[in-house]
Each structure stands twice: as C-alpha cells, then as structure tokens.
Image (cartoon, rainbow, N blue to C red):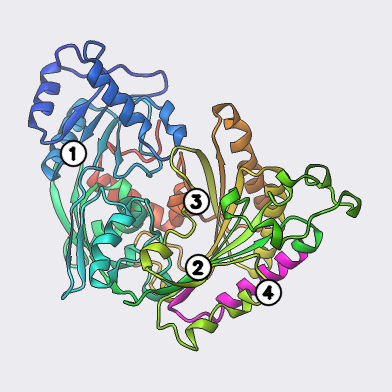
Amino acid sequence: MAHLRFVTTANCWTELARDSAELQALAAALTGEFVYLDEQNPMLCAKYEAAVRSGWNAVTAAKRPIGFVFCANTNDVVHAVNYARKNHPHVVVRYNDTDNRALCDGALVLDLSRMKNCRVWPCDKVALVEPGLNWDEVNAATMEYGLAIPGPGGPIGVTRSTMAGAGGLLSRQYGLSCDNLVEVEVVTTDGTVLTASTGENSELFWAIRGAGETVGIVTSMLFKTVEVESSGVYAGTLVFPVEWGKEVLLAKEVFNTWIQMNNSLPANASIKCVLVTPPPEERASLSSRPIHKPSWGSSITAQENTYKYAYSHASLVFTCFYNGPVDEIGTTVFMPLSLMGPAINTIGVMPYQDAVNLTQWLTPRAERYYSEGAIIESEAAAMTVLDAAIQATRKSARVFVAFEERAGGEVGMTDANAMAFPHRAPHYHVTMVAKWSDPTDDQTSETSVQALHRQLDAADLLTGGCSMVDFVDKVDEVAAWGPHHKKKIADLRSEYDPAMVLMINHP
C-alpha cells in the first residue's frame, strides 16, 4: 500500500492522497475489498481491469477511476465515505453493473454490487432489499410467495432504477417501484447512517424517490410487495414487421390501435412498444413473409433481393402483460392488436419472471450503448415520432426506439409533489437507443440518436422533460425534475452533501 498514489487527470478535480497511511487504514477497516492500480501487484491490477470492464455498457471500459471500494456492508460504506470526504476525491456509486454514470475518470467508485441479501416477510407483504441486487434476483426471492415489487425486471439494478422512478409491467396496477418504497437506510456524506421514511427524515425520503444520487448512498430498501397471479400471468410478444410500403401503412394502423388501447386497458394490463431491428432468432420466419421484388419500386430493394436481407429490417414489437385469471375476459384484452395479423404471436400463460424478460434480447451484456430520452404528451405527436423513428431505424439497424405509456393507471394517481420524481401527467415516454459493437463506430452511433432527438425537438414534439434512467452521462436536472423540484433538491443537497462529494454530473 505504501506505493499507492492517486493521479489526477487533466479534466478531473480529484486530489492526490495526502498520506498512504490513510489508504492502509481504509483497506484494513473494510470487510470488503479495495481495488486499485498497483504496478508492483499484477493480481491487483487484474482485479482493477476486471472491475472496469464488468459494466453492462462496454463504452465505460475506457474509464479510469482511481480505485474501487467493494463494500460488503453498511460499515464499509461509512469508512469509504469518511475517507473520500477527508481526501476530496470525486465519488461515484455503482450499485449494479447495469448502472449509468457509475464510472468516471479519476473518481473513487463505491461499488455496492456485492451487497445482495433479500429477505421477504410474506405475511406483511414487505421485502428488505440490499442495494446490489438486480430485479431478476429480487423476483426470484419474492415469487416464492407469489409476490413481486413493481419494477422493470431483468438484470437491471433495483436501487438506481428505483431512485430514478422506473416502472414495469405491474406499474399500471400498483405504481412505480419508488411508489412502493416504504423505508430506506442511507449513509450521508458526513458518515451518518439515517433511516428515512414518510414518518422519519421525510424530506430525505422525498429526495431519495427520484433524486437519491444527490443526497446520500442507499444501503437498504424496504418495499411493499404486491400479489402476482399464482398460476402464471398472461403475457407475450406481438411482432409486426415495418419494412416495405404496405407494412409501414399497417404499422401506423397498429401503432394507432395501441395508443387507443392504452386509453381503455384495465389497470392490471399493460402493453409496451419498441421499434427495433430484431436479431435473426427473434424475426418472423421467411415462410410467413412475402419476398420483396426489385421491380416493386422500393427505395431499399437493392439490399433486399437476397435471402440474407429479405427480412432484416425493423419491426414493431409489443410486450403484452395481464396479471389476472386467464378466462374469457383475460384472453380478449389484447385482441385488438392480435387480430391485426402479427408475424409472431407468443402470448400465453407464463411465470412472471419470464414475462419481465421477454425483450431482454434488446440489450445484451457487453455491447456498446448510447441513449437519450424524451416525453411526449399528445397522441398526434406520438404518431409523428413513429414516422421519424421508422426513418431512423431504416438508416441504421443500430437504432431502436421504445415507447411506453407511463402515467396510466396507478402511476397517475400519485401526487407529482409527493416525491422528487415528477412525471405523473399523462404522457408517453420515448427512449432512443443505439447499440453497436465496434469502438470505431462510437461517434456515428451516438450521432444517429442525437440527430433523431434534435429532429423531434425541432418539430416541437417534446415537452422538455426526461427520466433519470435515460441519462448515460451528464444529467439535465431541469428536464429530470422540473425547475420547482430542482430548487428543492438543491436545498436538500446542500444540507445532506454540502461538499458535493456525490457529483451526478461528472467534472
């Protein structure tokens, strides 16, 4: 440890460690592990490289933090925060390897991904969740009792998504994950461990639900759990190709049908939509599709007149979900869409854990990702956004665009001022994503998403709001929280993190 020195980068205000003895004291105090670059310790260097490359988004592998504190418990978090406050390094928190903004050049990373206990009290319908868990792990624990916490599902980290106000297939019926949060344990940047709920440290609890990254480090969360149909949920995907002229016209009819269905869906049902070029194993078989001919006059015929490209263009993929008895009523919920002739229809009874993972193929691990989000309020605007999204996906198969009706059902019943998460008015949440593999394509891939966002903004289709989950790098605080909430969050930040140790916008 005597050889360890923190080196600052040109664009980072991280300071050098004042005394290597303090580093030794930190490492000795930890139950977990302190990982950093040490040329004299190849094993430690290998652990450092593995930690940098463990993120879901391969773009972050180029980041060079000064080190990782892998916390095993709350005491480890306290030791790490006390060290960080005294020595002034820039601190970021990584709860899970899927987190955005969890690595930064020159930062000290507090990694809580090894804190993975989950305890369920089925009689009280509550679950105590540690911060390193992902939704698959939590669902595995709660579904033993036929219970779940409303959330996005899959490998997404529970803590950061909850603090960002994320929703899932159950949200129309039971609200967002942050709506079902009962109590949290938080370590503030002065090393104090606090419990926050509606009855204790209520202002801190208000901020955690929507802006938790600004006021402290969450070390445990107590959630309400909700009942899921014990025999299985009624769910699946409907796939409508959007390749050629007639299919584009049909796609618009299908998309409009989806919009109208959202206005009348029962609370225990939801349908999400994504416009994407599916991988080969998720596409409709050629036997179910007409083979396009060059003489038909399409602008894309040159690349489609072979088997290889015959059906490689975008599709509208709908994820349908119904949490209720599969009876004569339940099986008719999705009929307006299913009767429109999807090329693929997988709707059936399945475990809840399978339903929340129906479209995990959209975001495989270790690919490179860039995303931007937006909120639109009118149905007419949604149709115009679809037109622009179809053109963007035709230009690049790397781009996909997800649409979700976010304020239907229980979500819109919660007061927008009840917590820091403000987006409660009826709206559609749009996420524009680029996914690619080759680092040399970074600029063109990011530009394709940025251009689409600028096009929609210039057409005055967007509200200017955005969800925290959509920010890969710098956070637009007004877009995320609105001007009123931003001011209140800034006041709470000055109270709980006056030195701004936790910087959500990296220098």
Q: Quadrant of the C terminus?
A: top left
Q: CA distance from mark 4 to mark 2?
A: 16 Å
Percent x, y of residue 177: 34, 63
Question: What number is the disc on residue 361?
Answer: 3
- Read off the magenta span: 248-271
Above or below, 38 relative to 341: above
Q: Amino acid at mark 1?
A: Cys
User: Quick one: SS at disc 2?
Assistant: strand
Residue annotated with mark 2:
236
Residue annotated with mark 4:
340
Q: Residue at x 46, y 63 (%)?
A: 423
Please indicate, yes or no, whether residue 10 appears anywhere in the rendered image.
yes
Residue annotated with mark 1:
71
First reached walking from the N terminus: tag 1 or tag 2: 1
Q: In the visual, does 100 lie left or right of 385?
A: left
Q: Amino acid at mark 3?
A: Trp
Mark 4 residue crowding within 10 angstroms, few (<14) / some (14–19) / many (20+): some
Quadrant hosting residue 506: top left
Q: Amino acid at mark 2?
A: Gly
Do residues under tags 3 and 2 come within 8 Å of each other at their CB atoms?
no
Percent x, y of residue 136: 33, 56
Q: CA distance from mark 3 to mark 1?
A: 31 Å
First reached walking from the N terminus: tag 1 or tag 4: 1
Query: Is residue 93 inside the magenta stretch?
Result: no
User: Quick one: SS at disc 4?
Assistant: loop
Question: What number is the disc on residue 136?
Answer: none
First reached walking from the N terminus: tag 4 or tag 2: 2
Q: Main secondary structure of the magenta part?
A: helix
